[in-house]
Image: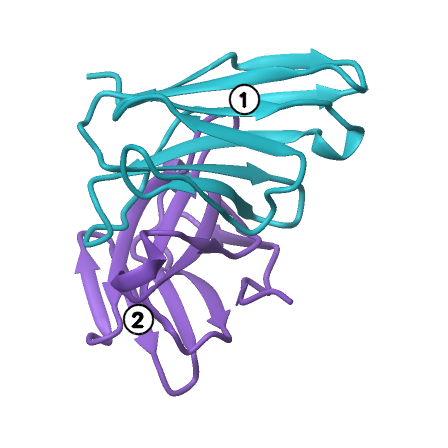
Amino acid sequence: NAGVTQTPKFQVLKTGQSMTLQCAQDMNHNSMYWYRQDPGMGLRLIYYSASEGTTDKGEVPNGYNVSRLNKREFSLRLESAAPSQTSVYFCASIPGRWAPEAFFGQGTRLTVV
Amino acid sequence: DQQVKQNSPSLSVQEGRISILNCDYTNSMFDYFLWYKKYPAEGPTFLISISSIKDKNEDGRFTVFLNKSAKHLSLHIVPSQPGDSAVYFCAASGAGGTSYGKLTFGQGTILTVHP
């Protein structure tokens, strides 16, 4: 049982390049989330998907887009990467809003140069 | 403005003693609180949670206390073990309705337990 799987684990991008971070969960959870973690700031919510077919902005959505491909998969896309997007990105999922104890993936460390 | 704050960036304790990690929040709409533990190069792992209708929740060596009037919660680890050394994040969630499980995190506290 893998839980929440993120790919890639590490990535270096040049300013202006695009990329997609992949996330998949095998727990049949309804809701999925993307967070970023920066030094001294904890984790901040970028986008979330309360259920399959819906997505909504979180606290820091600028520069990102998301796709809830199906119930298992939730991807995060950077269309034109900027150095300010250098961060560690975490995907998470929960069964539903009645149980907000989120399960997290291992993270993607992204560096934009 | 930081709605969830952990004012101690780090805490160092001796093995076998009590570790107390603190967290303050400002948003009175938060009604569910969680603690996560994070090791380097891994994702956060859920540790313990508490609903706003309670003031205490225990799970083995871990106890979370909630003081709603002070908007303060704390995590007690007794006895502390070297394997508890990690970053601890406090997080809060709003009422079920439109919150959809969204979490607001504190900055984290680095706990070091010395043998």
Subunit bearing disc 1: A
Q: Which chain is purple?
A: B
- Give the residue displayed 43% in from the left and 84% down from the top: B70
- Checking the image for residue A71, the label placed there is none
Residue B103 x %, y %: 41, 53
**Disc 2 crowd, CA 10 A, few/some/many (<14, 14-19, 20+):** some
Q: Nearer the viewer, residue B61 or A60?
A: A60
- Give the residue displayed 23% in from the left and 37% down from the top: A30
On screen, residue B93 versus residue A97, left or right, reads right
Q: Which chain is cyan?
A: A
Q: Nearer the viewer, residue A14 or B39?
A: A14
Mark 1 falls on what kind of element? strand
Mark 2 falls on what kind of element? strand
Q: Nearer the viewer, residue B10 or A1?
A: A1
**Residue to which mark 1 is pinned:** A108
Residue B85 x %, y %: 45, 40
Contact between marks 2 and 1 (CB within 8 A): the answer is: no
Q: Would you say residue B85 is visible in this rendering?
A: no
Quarter of the image with the C terminus of chain A is: top right
**Disc 1 crowd, CA 10 A, few/some/many (<14, 14-19, 20+):** many
- Checking the image for residue B65, the label placed there is 2
- Give the residue displayed 51% in from the left and 12% down from the top: A8
Residue A61 x %, y %: 59, 42
Q: Would you say residue B6 is visible in this rendering?
A: yes
Q: Nearer the viewer, residue A77 or B18?
A: A77
Amino acid type, mark 1: Thr
Residue A110 x %, y %: 64, 22
On screen, residue A93 versus residue A111, left or right, reads left
On screen, residue B80 versus residue B58, left or right, reads right
Q: Which quadrant would residue B17 be assigned to in this image?
A: bottom left
